[in-house]
Image (cartoon, rainbow, N blue to C red):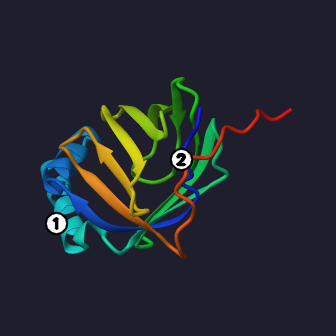
Amino acid sequence: QLYTDFSGRWSLTSTEGDMDAMLHHLGSSLGLGGVATWSLQTTAAAFNYLVGLAEVAVTNLARDHADVEANAASLLHTSRQLYIDGRLHTSVGSNPLGRFSYWAEWANTTFVMHVVAPMNFTLTTLLLPDGRMRLETTRGGLAFLFTRIGGVAPSMPRPPQPPPP
């Protein structure tokens, strides 16, 4: 099975969809009250939903795992190893997103992560023909578009790597 090489640093360049509705749902799912959820929405809008401020770094990408680090305007930082094996995992972080359960897989050359708690949604990550990375979510029809920092890497899918000995 082939998979797409998302390795590198990426900068958020645009969003699509109703970000306020998604943030309202996120606030409710995390148990935030009305004022806290409104503050989350207002702050995110003031920062243009982190367009130009959020970065994602993908390292050690292989057929069955990836290390992902996200930094949002130095306000929110998280680093996680994601397992891409079709089994349920729990990821624990120290940021407000904290703990979540997910399972991830390759669907053809597209990376698909199903988050099941605290919110239930699916993130689909694909490489566009122009070299940008697109994250789409089933929650509210949102999409996040990223541009690779430091040039364009090969957009061809990589062959699977043999498992470590």
Q: Is residue 19 above or below residue 101?
A: below
Q: Which residue is rendered at x = 52% and y = 69% of the image?
A: 152
* Residue 20 sits in quarter: bottom left
**Residue farthest top in this picture:** 87
- Helix, strand or loop for disc 2: loop
Report if the CB atoms under discs 2 and 1 are less than 8 Å apart. Answer: no
- Residue 22: x and y in percent read 20, 48
Q: Which residue is rendered at x = 54% and y = 23% of the image?
A: 87
**Residue farthest right in this picture:** 165
Q: Which residue is rendered at x = 56% and y = 64% of the image?
A: 153
Residue 4 numbered mark, or none: 2
- Residue 16: x and y in percent read 20, 57
Residue 42 numbered mark, or none: 1
Q: Is residue 32 visible?
A: no
Residue 157 numbered mark, or none: none
**Looking at the image, which is closer to me, 133 or 31?**
133
* Residue 25 sits in quarter: top left
Location of the C terminus by quadrant is top right
- Helix, strand or loop for disc 1: helix
Task: Classify residue 101 as left or right of residue 40.
Answer: right
- Residue 37: x and y in percent read 18, 53
Q: Amino acid at mark 2?
A: Thr
